[in-house]
Amino acid sequence: MGILKHSAAFPTVSGLPWTGVNYFCTTRQGGVSGAPWSSLNVGLHTDDDSAHVQANRLLLRARLPGEPVWLNQVHGARVFDADLPAEQEPGRLAVPPDADAAVTTQRDRVLAVMTADCLPVVLASADGSALGVAHAGWRGLAAGVLERTLLALRSRVPGNTHWRAWIGPAIGQRHFEVGADVFAAFVDQDGQAAAFFAEKIPGSKWLADLPSLARHRLHKAQVASIELSGYCTFSQPDMFYSYRRAPRTGRLVTVAWLGDAGQR
């Protein structure tokens, strides 16, 4: 189970300490939004009062060394380079870039992905020299968003062979029923992926273990150290938003940045 930390502002979930890497995922607690988004909703696209969302984002910003690099997540596999020249930085643009992952090698550059059942994944070199975050629903995961994030990171620090990953709160297998299209999207490209599907209705419905599918793919991509948070967003309504449990809901955010470990 991931580490739940409480502070005067709001509780967060994280994993084991990393050299040079700071990261956490918010819970739904500690914000200002009313029902059904109560209370720390950071998603501007959720029909919540935008003033409440902005107030929640200010609470988040107070815990960070800089403004987060927000993405317009589209359930794809595009990786955004968060170290682009200043005039191209998403924080200075009205519309964040369409992407489901971002990478950086700059200290205190805060990467962010929003989730409400999908996987938030933090990826970094073991020495803390390169960092990526990814939003991986089943579509993005099957399309290779994690592998593409690793490819982008490896191009930034050539020769670095030691990588770590943290897979944050997401929907658990017992609540993630999928059809033949999802089963085929993984198993047709990798027969070993069938081990992460429990057949519920023969040939028609399966229960998919999304975190384990991600861990499997990361292992194949030669990520040696992978930690799962152990939290299920669907089954813990007091702590997490879940789109599958209630489509009219808020969004969690996972943030990560390079710097001295222990700042979070």
Image (spheres, rainbow, N blue to C red):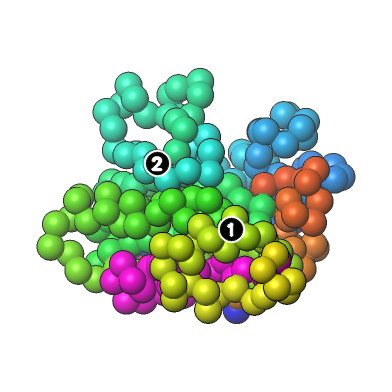
User: Number of marks in the image?
Assistant: 2
Q: Disc 2 on helix, strand or loop?
A: loop
Counting from the top left corner in percent of width and height, residue 19 is at: 32, 69
Q: Is residue 92 visible?
A: yes
Quadrant (top left, top right, bottom left, bottom right) of the N terminus: bottom right
With 160 as the anchor, is 170 left or right in this view?
right
In front: label 2 or label 1: 1
* Residues shaded magenta: 205-227
Query: Where residue 174 sits in the image (x, y, percent)?
Result: 72, 73
Q: Residues within 10 Å of mark 1 (few under 14, many from 20)?
A: some
Q: Is residue 18 left or right of residue 238?
A: left
Element type at mark 1: helix
Q: Is residue 261 above or below residue 100?
A: below
Would you name the residue on which mark 2 appears? 78
Q: Quadrant of residue 211?
A: bottom right
Q: Is residue 45 magenta?
A: no
The furthest residue to the right = 35
Mark with earlier residue (2, 1): 2
Q: Residue at x 27, y 49 (%)?
A: 152
Taking the spot 70% from the left edge, 73% from the top edge, the residue there is 202
**Which residue is more in the foreground, 85 or 231?**
231
What residue is disc 1 on? Answer: 182
Residue at the spot x=39%, y=41% of the render? 78
Q: Position of residue 112 (x, y in %)?
A: 49, 46
The amino acid beneath tag 2 is: Arg
Which residue sits at x=80%, y=62%?
237
Q: Residue furthest front?
A: 203
